[in-house]
Image: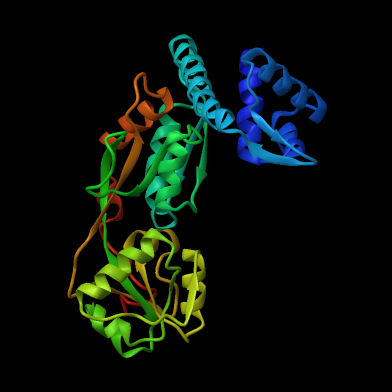
Amino acid sequence: MLFRQLDYLVALSRERHFARAAQACSVSQPALSEAIRKFEEELDVPLVRRGRKYEGLTPEGERIVVWAQRILADRDALRSEVGALRTGLSGRLRIGSVPTSSGAVAQLTGPFCAAHPLVTVEVMADLRSEEILRQLQNFEIDAGVTYLHEGLSDAFRSVPLYEERYVLLTDAADGLAHRTTATWAEASRLPLCLLTGAMQGRRVLDELFAEAGVRPSPRVETDSVAALFAHVRTGRWASIVPHTWLHVFGVPYGMRAVPMTEPARTVQVGLVTTAREPDSVMARALTEIARRTDVAAAVEHLPAAPGSQR
């Protein structure tokens, strides 16, 4: 009964709506409400601020949700650990990824699924760096693939995967398309389509532009790397994308990918998990795969543009 009450309370905190929380837990709304009410009686403290509709959790409720997430994560980890000892690893691995590293995630999921055929994998590929860390701490995902930086808290462990480099993606008819490299200053003068400023990938680009002494003025911004390719395909725009995405989309016909220089700095991307003990058996298994998979080698060389061999 306790685990059920904790499940319901966490779902209510996440959904912020009784009916949606009940639906997420596959129970009726009255059953969920009654279970939480009984939990409040057992603890002798109000957990939910009630009015004509859900108004949020009380301070006590917010604190108990933190404990509930930890307890439920430990329960799930225990079940996974026991199951792995008996029949091999099974269940569901949840990976969060910043949009620009989705191509690299595929380099891990293949060998992971081969090593653990009873596990299914869920990849959430449009998360911001901050959201990945938040979801890790709240046990909503098992691992994240994101940018590594010196300020990463001791609450996390990381495994470097590759160094993200950048290319200018432009129409094949553009003057820069036939160059072996392009500078950030040159790119800043083009009609650009870039990621939105709220995304870590864009903040990295802005730092590199600033290092070159320029500031871009993109006419189009998006939170989708696929949308960047779509805009460049029209012939009206240029963009700057991580080189790893060329291994997902290739270099589409009519486009060229030119490596960026001045500066030619790279940004490290890695696998991040929580530094808790005992750790998640899923996170541990994925970390083992990451340590023996040469992701960097798989994404090192740029694919050739169509027709470039002729």
Look at the picture and state if 30 lies above or below 208: above
Is residue 256 shown above or below 7? below
The reply, left or right, for residue 226 in relation to residue 30 is: left
Task: Please state if 114 lies on the left or on the right of 2 as rendered.
Answer: left
Q: Left or right of 190: which side holds 86? A: right
Quarter where residue 239 is shown: bottom left
- Whether residue 186 is situated above or below residue 166 in the rendered picture: below
What's the colour scheme?
A: rainbow
**Front-most of residues 209 and 109:** 209
How many numbered discs sit on the rendered protein? 0
Q: Position of residue 231 (x, y in %)?
A: 50, 77
Residue 163 visible in this rendered orientation of the protein = yes
Tell me which residue sits at (69%, 41%) in the image.
Answer: 55
Judged from this view, the residue extending furthest toward the top is 86
* Residue 170: image location, x then y, percent: 38, 80
Kindly identify the residue that appears in the image at 43 percent across and 37 percent down.
Answer: 136
User: Quarter of the image holding residue 42?
Assistant: top right
Pick the quarter of the image with the N terminus.
top right
| Residue 177 in view here | no
Seen from the viewer's position, the closer of residues 150 and 123 is 150
| Residue at 34%, 39% in the rendered image | 272
Left or right position of 17 against 260: right
Residue at image position (29%, 39%) is: 153
The C terminus is located in which quarter?
bottom left
The spot of residue 214 in percent (x, y) is: 26, 81
Front residue of this view, candidates 12 and 49:
49
